[in-house]
Every structure is written in structure tokens, then in C-alpha cells.
Image: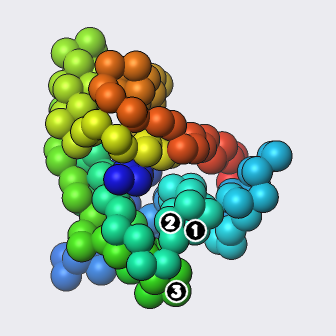
Amino acid sequence: MKKFFMIVPQQPVEQDVEGKIIRDDLRYSTYEAIGNSQLNYGETRFPLLAVLNGYAERDEKIRIIAAIPDTPQCLVHLEQLKGEVAGLQQEKGFICNEVESFSFTYSGDVNAQIELFQKLLNYMEDDDILYACLTYGNKPMPIAELMALQYGYRVMNNVSSGCLVYGEVDHSA
């Protein structure tokens, strides 16, 4: 089965007392893939959407797994991700019951990275095709994500890597 993985971004969000977003540092951008026209996609806050657009096919059942650092703004960004996925799902016609998610400790220490690695492995099975966005997370998080994907590829039976993306984010604006 095709499985799409990402770490939910931690960009700051400010909400008023009613929960309405008054500032959101997670901005829309256009992911520009070099050498892979399947990843051409319009504006999104989540480069994984370009991967879904390029590789999830009509009437194909897929799974999307979002790793959520345990910070409050990540829950806001998870809901934004779910909204963008729902729009693309309606347009492309792939089958995904829900954006699955799990929480893990937001920290740069080795124990947090082992936790992320182990939790990602729980979603991998023999015969999977793995896709991932390595854009978000503190420095060690995408490394732990990549290590889990490599582990799945090398240790499990008939697991392959479909596409990995890194959507460079310009924080200067």
C-alpha cells in the first residue's frame, strides 16, 4: 500500500480567545521540484500535497500518516493539513479514510528521536511503497524520519521508496 509520511510543522500560530487564528507563520508556497514533473503543484503549506498529487491515483486506497510534535500550534497545522488533503482528495479521487496521526515529544534529544523512529515503524508493513516529506521538524526529526523509512526499506519484505521531498522554506519574509 502507498503510505505518505510527514512531520507536522511547528510554525507559530496566535489565536484569539474564541480560537480564531490572528497570526499564522505557516505560509503558502509553491513547491518547485527539480527533475520530477510529477511533483508540479500549485500553492500549499505542505509539500506532501505535491507528492499526493503526483503519486496517489484515482480510486486507489492510500494512507497518510502525520507525526505531531507535542506543541499546541501543531494541532492547528494538523487541521490545516486535513483541509488541504480533503480538497485534493475530492479533486483527484484517491481513497483515504482519514489523515492518521500520532504525537511524539518535541525535543532535540536522542530519546525523542528514537520515539519518533519507533512510532513511524508501527505504520510500516511488508509490500508498502513509502513516500515522505522531510520539510518540517527540528534538525534531527527529518533524520529520524528518513532513518525509519530506510529501516522499512532494508528490513521489511518488498518495501520500496516512492518519493521523498524537502520543500525548502524561506523564513526571511
Callout 1 crowding tier (Cα within 10 Å): few <14, some 14–19, many ≥20: many
**Cα–Cα gap, marks 2 and 1:** 6 Å
Q: SS for tag 1? A: helix
Tell me residue 129's x, y (percent).
43, 45
Residue 53: which disc? 1
Q: Which mark is residue 56?
A: 2
Q: CA distance from mark 1 to mark 3?
A: 9 Å
Say what amino acid the circle numbered 1 marks: Asn
Q: Quadrant of residue 123?
A: top left
Q: If the image is split into quadrants, where does the C terminus sit?
A: bottom right
Q: CA distance from mark 2 to mark 3?
A: 11 Å
Tell me the kind of residue under disc 2: Ala
Q: Residue at x 34, y 41 (%)?
A: 127
Where in the figure is residue 141, as x and y percent of width and height? 38, 28
Q: Which mark is residue 95?
A: none
> Dot 3, crowdedness within 10 Å: few (<14), some or many (≥20)?
few
> Residue visible at 35% across and 53% down?
1
Nearer to me, 26 or 36: 36
Are discs 2 and 1 less than 8 Å apart at CB? yes
Q: Amino acid at mark 3?
A: Glu
Question: In the picture shown, does residue 135 fall above or below 139?
Answer: below
In percent of width and height, residue 59 lies at 42, 78
Which secondary structure, mark 3?
helix
The residue where tag 3 is placed is 91
9 sits to left or right of 168: left
